[in-house]
Image (cartoon, grey):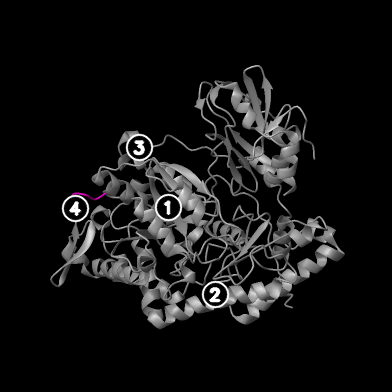
Amino acid sequence: MNFPEKLLYTKDHEWTLIEGDIAVVGITDFAQSELGDIVFVETPEVGTKLNVGDSFGVVESVKTVSDLYSPLTGEVVEVNEALVDAPETVNTSPYADGWIVKIKMSDTSETESLMNVADYKSLVKK
Amino acid sequence: MSTQYQRGLAFTEEEIFGRGSPGRSGVDFSDGGFEDIADPAKMLPAGYVRGGLEGFPELSEPEVVRHYTRLSQWNFGIDSNMYPLGSCTMKHNPRVNEAVCRLNGFTDLHPYQPDEDCQGTLKLIHDLGRWLCEITGLHSATLQPAAGAHGEFAGLLMVRSALQKRGDARSKVLLPDSSHGTNPASAALCGYGSVTLKSGANGKIDLAELDRLMDEQVAALMVTNPNTLGIFESDIVKIAKIVHDRGGFLYCDGANLSALMGKGRFGDMGVDVAHLNLHKTFSTPHGGGGPGAGPVCVTEELTPFLPTPMVVKDGDKYKLDSGRPHSVGRVHGFNGNVGVLVRAAAYILSMGPEGLREATEAAVLNANYIKARLKEHYHTPIEGNSLHECVLNDKYQNEHDVTTMDIAKGLIDRGFHPPTIYFPLIVRGALMIEPTETEPKETLDDFCDAMIDIAEKAKADPESLKQAPVNTIRRRLDEAHAARNPELRCTLCS
């Protein structure tokens, strides 16, 4: 199972890639593998304001439906429209083409409370 | 072990669209006397008459009968074999209930007839409400809601109205992480946010966590008791006190009442509002998603907020009372799904108090019998005895790359409906088994033998389970492909 070093992680099995004040968010390889075949991704409207822990979307697989929780405070500036027609991209490419939203952070210091790869790996091992 | 399931003729059957031939019909209208029906323009306002209909199949009566009979043979219901779908309580639907609900006195009524013409039906609604209150230890009931989730919605609306009347509007509902998925959906429909309450290590509500999250914005805690792991929330009285001390209401999802009926009462546990599923505990058919009933029972405090109209007794007469100023209003047309209510009343009367208690005892015994027979073969994530359902998982089978999905498909090949799988969410690869009280020991043994056979196959021949089901008319369906690329075959819709 693949956990890139450059990403930050949450206990809800999401990853974040920080690019300046933009946070790209998706679900981890572990999450997609636990969910199984993903058949639908519901994304928020661009412009949606999110606080840490707010539910901003839904991932539906043949097994279950899971909420997506915002790892950071900010505003949605872009969503991955390609997932509407190809939700399986989250399975095949969770860290690249399967990204879900981009959030413009209002407080970049919040990234300090996210997990690094070592912490996330030990969470998954449990 | 029974092998009957391996034999039988199943017809393949194509869609009905594109079959038959133009002009073929089950009934001949050409002989005169049917002019009005033959020409709808004579009977209906112009705006309601369809000009034409392309692609509508035209078939003879036997063709239509065979089509649907063959399709019905692909189905699997409680009338075919054991259907141990956890939390759904797929118990036998007694045929006497069907006879009773078809009595002319019920079926020939029109809901617009005046109350004095409907005394029997009104009495039944009134009395069934009283019996459900006696079973739950609560004060009064509405029988209008048409399903469990509808009952949840009606119950939370009453909580919201009661809080508004106190001048204490609140913003959220607390939900254990083992709760049914309908609970957060009902909270959202009532305008509440939902906050997840993480279960303790034993699968029960963690009192410290409840104490931390139960604040003055929480309108209600929605519990299921016993919870979806089949475990009784033994701290329920303490839980109720924490919720009540901070001004909230305790909602109980009655999906699992089959474990308590005649033994423990929600009202005595401190519950303020609970919905029941007549199609689970009270033996009415689940009916393909068709008419159900999810009555809601409430405390005296919440009684003013019950939906209207209420059936009330006035002297010797029964009448519909709509004059209730604090009511949340109607939640269903007329009096709800009355045919379902009649079946449930027939069930309660035919069982009697002792019979209901025995049903509960047998439901709990059956679940524990299965757990005891299977625990060497399947991992049991929750130790100790269960109530009416038990949860296993695929931990041992994972060593051979066999998953819960493969076990479920293997059960189909062995003639059983699979249990609820991958729920509750807090157990990885969950298999949630609820046999109900209506299965005899021989059937439970057949089921356990099938499960044990699957566990053996997982070790010796895992590939055979990956192939399952092989005895069905269709092999394993590609659910992901079907969901991602639905192919609509109805020519009328395309």
Residue A85 in view: no
Magenta portion: prevailing SS class: loop
Measured Cα–Cα span from mark 3 to mark 4: 39 Å
The amino acid at mark 1 is Leu
Name the residue tied to disc 4. B324
Measured Cα–Cα span from mark 1 to mark 2: 26 Å
Q: Residue furthest right?
A: B460
Whether A27 is drawn above or below B299: the answer is: above
Name the residue tied to disc 3. B48
Mark 4 closeness class: few <14, some 14–19, many ≥20 residues within 10 Å: some
Mark 3 closeness class: few <14, some 14–19, many ≥20 residues within 10 Å: few
Q: Quadrant of residue B351?
A: bottom left
Whether B285 is drawn above or below B153: the answer is: below
Comparing labels 1 and 3, the label whose residue is closer to the camera: 1
Chain to which mark 4 belongs: B
- Residue at horizontal 81 percent and vertical 55 percent from the top: B401
